Amino acid sequence: MHVFENPVFCALDTTSVDQAVNWTRALKGHVGGVKIGLEFFYAHGRSGYQAIAREGVPIFLDLKLHDIPNTVAGGLRALMLLDPVPAIVNVHCSGGSAMMRAAADAVDGRAKLIGVTILTSLSDADIVEAGFTADKDTADHARALAHLAQTAGLDGVVCSPHDVAGIKHATSSQFLTIVPGIRPAGTDAGDQKRIATPGSAIQAGADILVIGRAITGADDPAAAAHAITRDVETARG
Ligand code: C5P
């Protein structure tokens, strides 16, 4: 049983509303949803969000909230007033369990609430510098934070393709893993380091794949999304 029949969410990494809407129109029916983030939302806010939402695709609003419990809960309550409500929103797990519980209360089941564990841009040395204990590496800390997120009532976490299996092992089968860093076989890795193909990420247990440039940078984004979906379907068997 899959939460999203099509697990592919396309990252609309642009500050242009026209570009984002054009991609969304082209991809409708070929992806499970689209992801918009800080840059787009800070630039265009509610009206930009609604321009995309009008196309009728589920939206992952990737704003990664991180503040005291009361402020995060207030921010999420404001986001829950968006019409339609985003399919997925997220917070930083390192905000702590009280913050995550407050976030879960605020969302109240209206969207999937996802935790960011350890940013994949951080190395083992970076997290020690930031005050994490050196006896665990980034993967161990990500697993521990995923477990804490589940206990606090979150629906899942974002993680690298290489951490999916470990996190799935440490959490319940319903706990979602959202996985960026996906590259179809033969495409350019770009700035991503820990990559996997769509099929191998699904086989490792990924529930949602966040894919940007492999779709938006293709000559025919709909065809690229369609090919990725076929790889996913083969992996699901
Ligand atoms: O173009 P590409 O497929 O690399 O885009 C991946 C998307 O996922 C981007 O929007 C990127 O910011 C996001 N992301 C990521 N790694 C994370 C979290 C989010 O690449 N750990």
Image: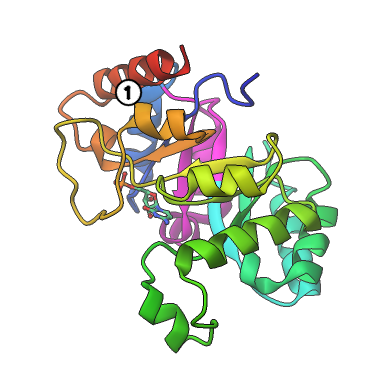
Q: Residue at x 85, y 55 (%)?
A: 105
The part of the image, by quadrant, that contains residue 90 is bottom right
* On-image quarter of the N terminus: top right
Name the spot of residue 200 as percent of width and height, x first.
Answer: 36, 31
What's drawn in magenta, residue-wise? Answer: 31-60
Q: Is residue 71 above or below residue 56?
A: below
Name the spot of residue 233 as percent of width and height, x first.
Answer: 42, 14
Say what amino acid the circle numbered 1 marks: Ile
Q: Residue at x 36, y 72 (%)?
A: 123
Q: In the rendered image, is residue 92 in sight? A: no
Left or right, 115 with respect to 57, comes to: right
Q: Nearer the viewer, residue 87 or 143?
A: 143
Name the spot of residue 165 as percent of width and height, x first.
Answer: 51, 42
Q: Is residue 125 above or below residue 150?
A: below
Identify the residue position indicated by label 1 in the image.
228
Left or right, 150 with respect to 34, comes to: right
